[in-house]
Amino acid sequence: MKRLLEAFEANFAAGIEVGASASLFHEGEEVCSLHGGHRDADRSTPWDADTLCLVWSATKGPSTACVLHAMQSAGVDLNTRVAEFWPEFASSGKETITLAHVLSHRAGLCALESDSATAFDHTSVVAAIESQRPVTPVGTMSAYGPRVFGYLLDEIVRRLSGGEPLGAYWRRVFADPLGLDFWIGLPTDHHHRAATMLSARVEELASQASDPFAKAFADPSSLTRRAFASPRGLGGVAAMNTPAYRSASFPAMGGIGSATALARFYSALSEECAGHGAGLFSKPVTDWMTTRLTQGLDGVLQKEMAFAVGFMMDPLDGERRKIRQLLGPCESSFGHAGAGGGLAFADPVRRIGFAYLMNKMEPGVLPNKRCLALVEAAYKDLGD
C-alpha cells in the first residue's frame, strides 16, 4: 500500500495533521493500518495503535446497523410506520412517517422546538420528539439531523428490541462478536486511550465564511443552526473531551474507536452485501444499504446529498455519474463522514472497508483534500 502510506505521510509533512490513523480492508482482510502524530495538543503523547478517536457523525453508520438489525429481527420493513411500534410518536402530524422517512432524513425531525429536552436525558428528548411537529414536509427533501437522528435511532432500537439501548445493542450484536474496538458510550477504563479533539483554527473557519452551510450556520434563526443546536446541553469541541461526554451514549455523534475497528465494521458490511458475509443481514436489508432513498439539496447541510438507510452515498448526475467521489468510484458505496474530516465507508463491489480518523479538525460539512487524497491512493494501490 505504497501510495496510501505516501498520502498519509504527506498530510503530516504539509502540517495539516496532529494525529491520525487510517485502515483499509480488502476482501475481509486488513491490508493497511497506519497511525502517526500525537493524540494531544502539546504533541507530547504519540498516537499509537492503541489510540481511540471520537468520530462525530461517523457514529451514525454503526448506529444505523443496529436499527437495521433490530428491524430485521422484529420483522418490520422500510414501509412500516414508526407509530405502529412507538404509538406516542404519532402525535402532531407524524402518524404517516415510516422508517424509510426517518432513516433517509425525510421525517422533518432534524430540530426540536422544546426547551425541556436536554442531551444527557434520553427520556426528555424522546418526549420532545413525540410532541414535535415535522419542520419540513414529510417524504420530500432531506433535512439532516446532526443530533436528533441519534435519539430517533436509539428509541427505535429500544422499541423493537424490548428496551435495549442502542449502545448496548451495538456491543452485543456487532462489537463483541466482530472484535470491534469501537464504543457508543466509552467505558471509563478506556478513557486514557482517547485522543484529544482539536477544533479548527479561527483563520480556517474564516476561509469558509462564504460557504452556504457556514452562512446558514451563522444565522441563529436558520434550520441549519437550529438542527445543530438541539437538543440543548452539548458543548463545543472541548466539552467532547471530558469524561462525561466520552461515557455518554450519543448514537448520532459520540462514537469513539479505532480506524481499524470502523474499517473492519464496513468490511463486514461489504462482505454481507457481496454475499460473502457471516449472515448478519438478509439480502433485502443489504439491498437497502446500497439504494439511494433520496438525493438533492439538503435543507440543513446546504449541499447536494444522497442518503440510503441512514448511510451517506455519493450523489449522482443525470447519467448516473458521481458528482463527487468521497466514497470512491463505486456507485453503490455507502458510509458516513464525521465532523472535522473523518470518514468510513464500504465498497460492496470491490469488497472494501475504509476508515480515516484524526483529532485536528478542519472546517466544512464533508471531508476535504487530506481525506480524499487517502481514498484516491487506496484505490490506486488496489489497481483502480
Image (cartoon, rainbow, N blue to C red):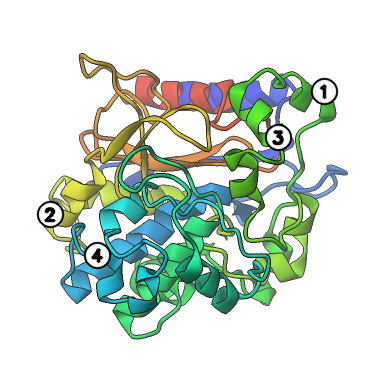
Q: Nearer the viewer, residue 61 or 35?
A: 61
* In this rendering, the label closer to the viewer, 4 or 1: 4
Q: Earlier in the sequence, mark 4 or mark 1?
A: 4
Q: Earlier in the sequence, mark 1 or mark 3?
A: 1
Q: Earlier in the sequence, mark 4 or mark 2?
A: 4
In the picture, the disc for residue 185 is none
- Secondary element type, mark 3: loop
- Secondary element type, mark 1: helix
Amino acid identity at mark 4: Arg
Farthest residue, direction top: 319
Residue 7 in which image quadrant: top right
Residue 198 in percent (x, y) is at: 77, 43
Could you tell me which quadrant the C terminus lies in? Answer: top left
Q: Which residue is mark 3?
A: 219
* In this rendering, the label closer to the viewer, 2 or 3: 3
Gap in angstroms between the C-alphas marked 4 and 1:
46 Å
Q: Which residue is mark 4?
A: 81
Question: In the image, 345: left or right of 112?
Answer: left
Amino acid identity at mark 2: Pro
Q: Earlier in the sequence, mark 3 or mark 4?
A: 4
Q: Which residue is mark 2?
A: 284
Q: Earlier in the sequence, mark 2 or mark 1?
A: 1
The residue at the point 59 percent across, 35 percent down is: 341
Gap in angstroms between the C-alphas marked 2 and 3:
42 Å
Farthest residue, direction front: 92
Gap in angstroms between the C-alphas marked 4 and 2:
18 Å
Few, some or many residues within 10 Å of mark 3 (<14, 14–19, 20+): few
The residue at the point 30 percent across, 37 percent down is: 294
